[in-house]
Amino acid sequence: MKVIDNIKDLKSYLSEYKKDNKKIGFVPTMGALHAGHLSLVKKCISENDICVVSIFVNPTQFNDKHDLETYPRTLEQDCKLLEQAGCAVAFAPSVEEMYPEPDTRQFDFGTVSSVMEGIRRPGHFNGVAQIVSKLFYAVEPDNAYFGEKDFQQIAVIRAMVKQLGIPVNIVDCPILREEDGLALSSRNVRLTAGQRQKAPVIARTLKESVNFAPEKSVQEVIDYVTSTINAVPEMRVEYYEIVDGNTLQSISQWSDTDYPVGCIAVYCGEVRLIDNIKYQPLSK
Ligand code: PAF
């Protein structure tokens, strides 16, 4: 596997593939790779002629300085995992390489970026759009792979490529979970042993709520999920919203959408976890 740290070398390496009309697949990451990332890499390898993975902890998307400082950085281990997985190129640039000067671009993606995470993490999606657009310009991928755990992020990236006219196909990949249901996340390593035992209540409660949703109102489902998780010591639901999966607008009745998705953010101690689940639409 080739490890490249600057855009010029990356472009020159990929130009051979472009010249031969080969398909370039791309998985953007912030490193601290786990099985969830590797499932994206596997899919990327199987669907393209070459797989590029970026590893870059993007400062502009962190609205919390402490979160940026404590974000796990494990480049050496990440490269080993990528090599084993069969990835061809790891792109691991410095902050100076990606931001030779401050990125002052301010995006407006309307409601997909202003709800849920957009309210709680001001500037987060603007930072995501800044870095992902820069990475897309650097890699020029045919296909780019994103995990559905960050459900809203995918909607924002779809809006971004449309707005900027970037010719890339965005591929959503299902959430990977631990055996006890906890969605894989680089932040899970920051849970204490006690918190790690409690955290699966999030996925368990979401799953239960899908089973009884058909007999309950949207508000009853929201109340059930919120109160069940809040009843566990150290767990605090920041928000739970059931939205239309395309527009990300909250729904108040099941008949409001044919693509209902529940999106949640929960503090487990100091660690913020997100997850989501799809509900059955009302049959028409
Ligand atoms: O999902 C992530 O890990 C990041 O938001 C991304 C897409 C790599 C941009 O920094």
Image (spheres, rainbow, N blue to C red):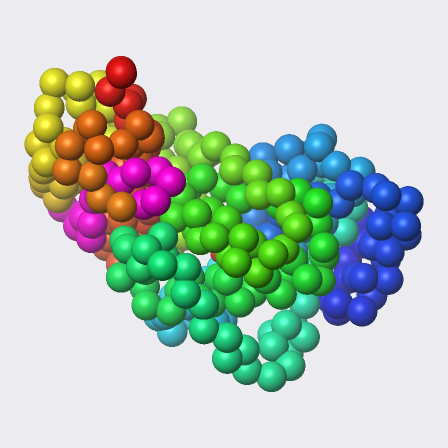
User: Is 41 a magenta residue?
Assistant: no
Instruction: Please state which of residues 32 and 127 is positioned toward the viewer in this rendering.
Output: 127
Q: Position of residue 183 (x, y in %)?
A: 39, 38
Is residue 200 something that shows in the picture? no
Q: Is residue 257 above or below residue 264?
A: above
From the top left corner, tell me how far across and down residue 260 is, in percent: 29, 32
Q: Nearer the viewer, residue 268 or 227?
A: 227
Which quadrant of the structure image shows residue 225? top left
Chief SS of the magenta region: strand
Question: At 71% from the left edge and 31% from the top edge, which residue is drawn?
Answer: 46
Can I make out residue 249 in this image?
Answer: yes
**Image quadrant in which you'd find residue 284:** top left
**Image point (64%, 81%), residue name:** 100
Residue 246's spot in the image, x, y percent? 38, 40
164 with respect to 271 (left or right):
right
The percent position of residue 13, horizontal first and vertical second, equals: 86, 57
Quick check: 245 left or right of 61? left
| Image: magenta residue range | 233-248
Res 281 quadrant in image:
top left
The residue sitting at 64% across, 61% down in the picture is 135
